[in-house]
Image: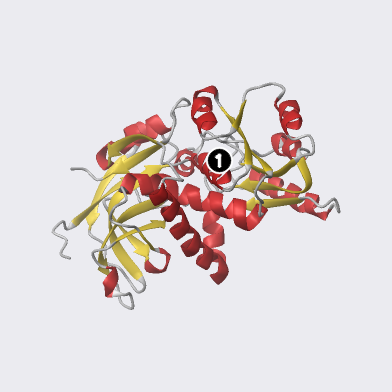
Amino acid sequence: MVETNSQVTQIVLPGTVEPSALQIRKRPLPVPGIGQALMKMEATGVSRAEQSMRRGIHRGQPAFPFVPGFDVVGRVIAVGPSTDPALIGRRYATITKIGSWASHLIVQAEYLVPVPEKLDAAAVETVLSHGVAAWQMLHRIAKVNQGQSIVVTDAGGGCGAALVQLGRHAGLRVIAIAPAHEHARLRHEGALVLDCFAPDLGRRINELVPGGAAAIFTHLGGERLVKLWKLVGKAGTLVLYFSLSTSNDIEPGLWPASWDIARLRVWNLVPNGRRARDFALCEGRFRNRRRRQWWHEDANKVLELLCQGILKPQIAAQFPLSETDLALTLAESPDVSGKVVIVPDV
């Protein structure tokens, strides 16, 4: 496949600035190295990762300036040495952590997941990373069984929505906690819904699961995490996930997350049958061969469920790459429902 465009357009985050201060940068088309592929972007998006990076509080983010972009769907147009040339011309998706807010980008070939031609790129972008994170937390971390009750504290978010849909598909009783504008959708999906702003939220959860939940999935840290731990049932699991956000949306750096992880470690020392786990999709993906194998297996499973209509993409809006500032502004709106997707300029 011949790429006639000799330049890449990138959206640069120069510092802790407002969305309107994002910069558009033109660079020569990059050349893939060993084990790499050059991808032409078909869809990327705005997740909580980029929103927290803008405020400088995302775990592990690089120094400013850099090109954000957590994941991407696109078509491979060139490969580097020691990379299978059969990749060229085919559609793939992958997690990048940063760099996908660009018309073209270099990706690691070993993490590419094939995307069927029949699937819409924006739909894949909306569900892939959220879906894989949710699948692994449900089935590989918490290992929940049909008929058990789980609590999802951020059911209005992308990962929370995937937990609800996959939980219901697995025959679980799902208690979804979300703001009011998400309640109708969550009830339609079969969840028991509680308002995230209810002052008596802990008591309401106790009424629905008096023996404690089989699993609680949350991105909330601090004292809210302590309260949730008390709601976990015997042999249950509390999962604190950092795949899309830090544990604290105000304080920068690693300290808030470190305190929360320390709590989890201490709680696991108590011989009461309950488990407390932290989960980070990207960190696990790079850590060892088994987690890399999980990534491929589970990503393919998520795309299969998308094809079957089990996972339903919630797309709030689509913006061309040149209007990423507007996309980020909308994504940070408190009332937005679904994921904001970025697509190539026409």
Horizontal side, residue 146 vs residue 127: left or right: right
Q: Nearer the viewer, residue 188 or 119?
A: 188
**In what quadrant of the picture does the N terminus appear?**
bottom left
Q: Residue at image x 38%, y 47%?
A: 125
* Residue, disc 1: 164
Secondary structure at badge 1 equals: helix
Q: Nearer the viewer, residue 175 or 108?
A: 175
Furthest toward the bottom, the residue is 82
Amino acid type assigned to the residue bearing label 1 in the image: Val
* Residue 12 appears in the picture as rendered: no
Using the image, determine if residue 264 lies above or below residue 75: above
Q: Residue at image x 19%, y 55%?
A: 7
**In what quadrant of the picture does the C terminus appear?**
top left
* Residue 159 x, y percent position in the rendering: 52, 43
Furthest toward the right, the residue is 271
Using the image, determine if residue 138 lies above or below residue 186: below
Alpha-carbon neighbours of circle 1 within 10 Å: few (<14), some, or many (≥20)? many
* Residue 253 x, y percent position in the rendering: 59, 45
* Residue 100 appears in the picture as rendered: yes
Q: Quadrant of residue 224?
A: top right
